[in-house]
Image (cartoon, rainbow, N blue to C red):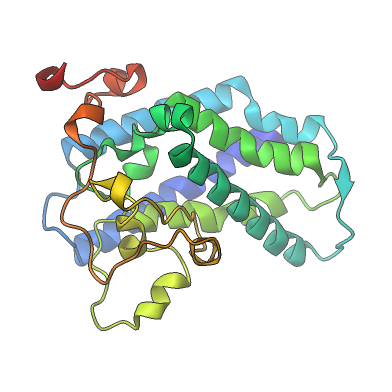
């Protein structure tokens, strides 16, 4: 399985996760509204163009072009997959935290936070600079830093699946069961935990950076969860960007505030 094939596998997983997130939200919506909105379509088109770019430039091909510096003496492929999942999730926590705490990175990352309502397509709303960082991160870890050349070809794609599923679930317009023990929100990322990452006044409530495992936010003091979702999402007007495919990439301000 080459780098291109791995990219296709992860894209298929992304589509299936998206269908699951939208389906669950249709059954138990947090905010009753159409399943697909104008924002959803903008998100999907943006994501499609970005993923086409990823395949076109062959970023994932680096997986088969280089051998990492450090070998991992773990022969069992299932243990390899578990380790790979924890490593990539840990790395994504810190990259995401940097997207908010390092001003030049936030300049691009705010595209993702420009939505004022959330659904499972929200993960596709990214600036190309953000997207390329996320695409290159597993390449650097599993193709440059760690020697995974002797691992089974399905191990890395499998390790990526929990994060892909979390991305669709955490943004879903899904009502989190009120009677569920609140400690469950720390087991795996979900709509309640991640909703506080998208709160409108994020400068006063900035946290919940985890991709799949909220434990990173607990360990490093960035858990800002509350018992119910916030009332407002998105950016304050002065930091907002135009809500169209081209405007998101050019970081244009909305016409009303330009």
Residue ID at (55%, 42%): 95
Residue ID at (37%, 57%): 170
Q: Is residue 96 above or below residue 38?
A: below
Q: Position of residue 181 (x, y in %)?
A: 35, 83
Q: Position of residue 149 (x, y in %)?
A: 84, 44
Please identify the quarter of the rendering in which residue 135 is found.
top right
Image position of 12 (left or right of 82)? left
Please identify the quarter of the rendering in which residue 128 is found.
top left
The reply to whether residue 48 is visible in this rendering is no
Camera-side residue: 98 or 193?
98
The reply to whether residue 162 is visible in this rendering is yes
Residue ID at (46%, 56%): 165
Image position of 145 (left or right of 126)? right
Q: Position of residue 146 (x, y in %)?
A: 80, 45
Viewport quadrant of the N terminus: top right
Please identify the quarter of the rendering in which residue 254 is found.
top left
Image position of 24 (left or right of 96)? left
Camera-side residue: 43 or 231?
231
Image position of 212 (left or right of 248)? right
Q: Is residue 75 above or below residue 155?
A: below
Residue ID at (46%, 47%): 14
Camera-side residue: 192 or 218?
218
Camera-side residue: 118 or 210?
210
| Count of numbered labels shown in the rendering | 0
Q: Position of residue 92 (x, y in %)?
A: 56, 47
Viewport quadrant of the C terminus: top left
């Amino acid at each position: 399985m080459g780098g291109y094939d791995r990219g296709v596998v992860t894209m298929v997983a992304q589509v299936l996760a998206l269908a699951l997130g939208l389906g669950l939200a249709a059954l138990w919506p947090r905010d009753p509204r159409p399943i697909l909105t104008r924002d959803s379509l903008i998100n999907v088109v943006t994501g499609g163009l970005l993923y086409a770019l990823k395949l076109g430039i062959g970023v994932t091909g680096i997986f088969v072009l280089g051998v990492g510096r450090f070998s991992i003496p773990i022969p069992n492929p299932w243990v390899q997959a578990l380790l790979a999942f924890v490593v990539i999730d840990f790395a994504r926590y810190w990259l995401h935290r940097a997207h908010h705490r390092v001003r030049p990175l936030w300049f691009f990352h705010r595209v993702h936070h420009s939505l004022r309502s959330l659904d499972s397509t929200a993960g596709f709303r990214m600036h190309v600079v953000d997207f390329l960082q996320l695409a290159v991160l597993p390449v650097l870890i599993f193709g440059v830093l760690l020697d995974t050349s002797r691992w089974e070809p399905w191990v890395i794609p499998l390790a990526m699946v929990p994060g892909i599923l979390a991305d669709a679930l955490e943004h879903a317009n899904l009502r989190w069961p009120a009677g569920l023990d609140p400690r469950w929100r720390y087991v795996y990322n979900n709509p309640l935990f991640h909703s506080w990452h998208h709160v409108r006044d994020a400068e006063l409530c900035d946290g919940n950076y985890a991709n799949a495992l909220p434990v990173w936010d607990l360990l490093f003091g960035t858990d800002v969860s509350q018992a119910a979702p916030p009332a407002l999402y998105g950016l304050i007007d002065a930091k907002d960007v135009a809500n169209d495919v081209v405007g998101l990439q050019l970081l244009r301000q909305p016409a009303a505030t330009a």
